[in-house]
Amino acid sequence: MTAAVPGLPVAPASRRGYTFHVSPLPPLVLDLRTARSAAHAAHDEARQILADLLTRHGWNVRSAAHEAGVHRVTLHKMIRRVGLTRPHKDN
């Protein structure tokens, strides 16, 4: 069994009597977590912008692409990338 290290939290001891010291995450891991959160936020924002654009144009991709200033095929790729699907029409 080891002695506690000052300043580090100690996890509960295992059945064999070992003590585990929990150290803070290294800065690189924290940066990756922050970057991943930012990427998720950007993905969600792009998804919402595309959804709003397509809703304004009644899911007419050609018209929406023209307003966005991109080619129709590019808009289709963007729609697929963010996981949007065309809503079903209620008749």
Image: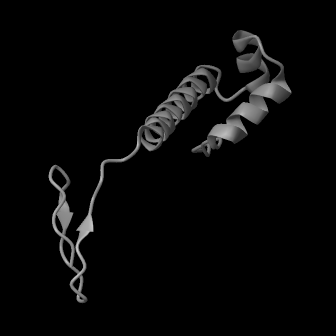
Q: Is residue 84 visible?
A: no
What is the x, y in percent for residue 82? 63, 38
Q: Is residue 5 above or below residue 90?
A: below
What is the quadrant of residue 18 in the picture?
bottom left
In the rendered image, the vertical position of residue 21 relative to residue 61, given as above or below: below
- Comparing 89 with 22, the one in front is 22
Q: Position of residue 40 (x, y in %)?
A: 50, 37
* Residue 64 visible within the image: yes
**x and y percentages locating residue 78 in the rendered image:** 71, 32
Quadrant of the image containing the N terminus: bottom left
How many marks overall? 0
Horizontal side of 13 relative to 35 (left or right) equals left
Q: Nearer the viewer, residue 38 or 8?
A: 8
Hey, which quadrant is residue 87 in on the image? top right
Give the residue drawn at x 57%, y 44%.
90
Left/right of residue 52 with respect to residue 17 in the rendered view? right
Scheme of image coloration? one colour
Quadrant where the C terminus sits is top right
Q: Which residue corresponds to the image point at 75% horizontal and 18% vertical from the top-left? A: 65
- Give 33 or 66, whichever is nearer the viewer: 33
Residue 88 or 2: which is nearer the viewer? 2
Quarter of the figure with residue 9: bottom left
Q: Residue at x 19, y 78 (%)?
A: 13
On the rendered structure, is 82 left or right of 40? right
The spot of residue 60 in percent (x, y) is: 72, 26
